[in-house]
Image (tube, rainbow, N blue to C red):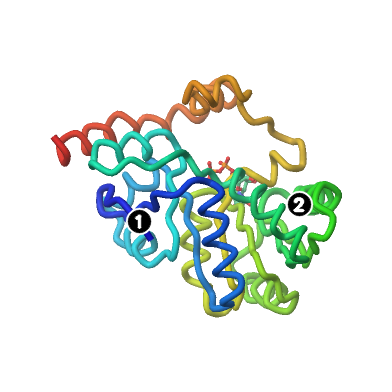
Amino acid sequence: MDTVDVLGASVACLTLGEAAEVVAGFVREGRPRQVITLNPEFLYRAQSERELMETVRRADLVTADGVGIVWAARKAGRPVPERVTGIDLLLRLAVEAGARHWRVFLLGAAPGVAEAAGRELAARYPGLVLAGTHHGYFKPEEEPEVIAKVRASRPDLLFVALGAPRQELWAARHLAALGVPVVVGVGGSLDVLAGKVHRAPVWLRRLHLEWLGRLLMDPRRWRRQLVLPKFALLVLRRHR
Ligand code: UDP
């Protein structure tokens, strides 16, 4: 697979469709694999947090979520064709799941949200089998139960929506125990599917300003976005 090294992460140079094909191959092969849609906030923290960087390094597919990563890949000398975000990958894989009757498990978000998102997916993509759902506010002592529930439902795909980077760490720690062919962290996607949160309009996304839309809709995000200039500086220093 063609990849570009962005601050220590091997980011796949793939379109959304190509990334979905790679994931379909993972499902066919069946051994547990992790997919990360990487954003700059995650990668910046990974520079100083070892477990985060190891999780990125061990992941089987890392895609460029966020314009910051797309820009950094260009600076690193090997452009990626487009952003491949969690929600876009989820929706594209749902098409495949519909065609191939894959079993899908949705884990995360507030109680009720994963169920609503699952109903929406099943309605939109006939053929997709909803293997199960569980909310994302379980206590550490409930974790074995959650893992057993996922495992027993034998999904082909597990979407984990606990927010980055928690969902990636969780998936990496439990990948073998979950026994699911593909685990993908999808952030706030279940809220979007359930109609609780709206994505930035397409015109804003085309202008590479989805981050601005998210900031306007949820001003508390400004704190997270403070790392973006620091991330940019790091990239510029590395690839002058
Ligand atoms: N969430 C969760 N359990 C938690 C904390 C968060 O299930 O303990 C969910 C939250 O309800 C939301 C998602 O994780 O659905 C995080 O969404 P966000 O848009 O913040 O994702 P990010 O952009 O951080 O990946």
Q: Secondary structure at mark 2?
A: loop
Residue 43 vertical position relative to residue 33 in the rendered view, above or below: above
For the point 32% across and 58% down, the residue is 53
Q: CA distance from mark 2 to mark 1?
A: 39 Å
Which corner quadrant holds the C terminus?
top left
Residue 211 location in percent, x, y? 49, 28
The residue lying at 61 percent from left, 26 percent from top is 200
Amino acid type, residue under disc 1 in the picture: Asp
- x and y percent of residue 85 in the render? 53, 43
What is the x, y in percent for residue 194?
A: 77, 42
Q: Quadrant of residue 66?
A: top left
Res. 112 visible in picture:
no
Residue located 77% across and 58% down the image: 98
Is 167 on the left-hand or right-hand side of 146? left
For this view, does 181 lie left or right of residue 78?
right
Which mark is drawn over residue 157? none
Q: Secondary structure at mark 1?
A: loop
Give the left or right position of residue 95, taking residue 65 as reference: right
Mark 1 crowdedness (10 Å alpha carbons): few <14, some 14-19, many ≥20: few
112 or 188: nearer the viewer:
188
Residue under the point 46% across and 42% down: 65
> In the rendered structure, which disc, 2 or 1, sits on the residue that comes first in sequence?
1
Q: In the rendered view, does 156 fall on the left or right side of 129?
A: left
Q: Are marks 2 and 1 in contact (CB under 8 Å)?
A: no
Residue picked out by circle 2 = 111
**Numbered badge on residue 2:** 1
